[in-house]
Image (cartoon, rainbow, N blue to C red):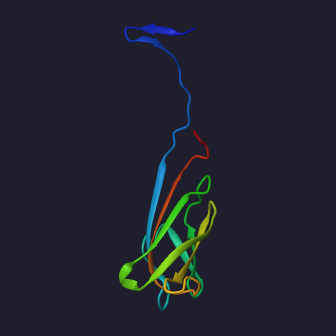
Amino acid sequence: MPQFSSRGMSRSVKSTQRNPILLAFRVTGTGTAVIDEGTTDATLTDNGTGDYTLTFAQAFSRAPAVTATCVATAGDAFACIHTVSTTAVRIVTFDATDGTTAKDTVFHVLVYGYDSADVY
């Protein structure tokens, strides 16, 4: 039976607390590829020219949203999100002049997810 108080009817509400998680990375893909910022949140694998995999230090409960943007001073290039899973993201970068040639470059990555698999 509901309890009443001076504020009106009071009921027990059960819900999962969703903790948003935002990870930010700066990757230098030229020469020996390295993570410049965000080194504790993921490891980097250089799969070949313009092809990188960031493996998260802690898996998400469901696949996160990911964006990647090339740094303008690194030359004319653009980044594509190839695959995203709960444990990793694969990013491929291309030369912007022809759009098909893989190119090593500097890029930023934002990963946004939750520590709960529940969906509103």
Residue 64 visible in image: yes
Of 28 and 100, nearer the camera is 100
Q: Can residue 27 be seen in this view?
A: no
Q: In this view, does 83 lie above or below 117?
A: below
Q: Position of residue 79 (x, y in %)?
A: 51, 75
Residue 69 x, y percent position in the rendering: 45, 72
Hey, which residue is sitting farthest bottom in the picture? 31
Nearer the observer, 20 or 76: 76
Q: Position of residue 85 (x, y in %)?
A: 64, 62
The quarter of the image holding the N terminus is top right
Number of numbered labels in the structure image: 0
- Residue 8 sits above or below residue 57 on the image: above
- 107 relative to 48, above or below: above
Q: Residue at x 35, y 83 (%)?
A: 73
Residue in front for this viewpoint, 22 or 59: 22
Which quadrant of the figure has residue 120?
top right
Relative height, residue 101 to residue 58 (above, below): below
Residue visible at 38% across and 12% down in the picture: 7
Q: Which residue is drawn at 48% across and 92% down?
A: 31
Residue 60 image position (x, y, % from top left):
58, 56
Quarter location, residue 118: top right
* Residue plotted at (50% across, 85% down): 33
Q: Is residue 75 left or right of residue 47?
A: left
Pick the residue in front: 2 or 119.
119
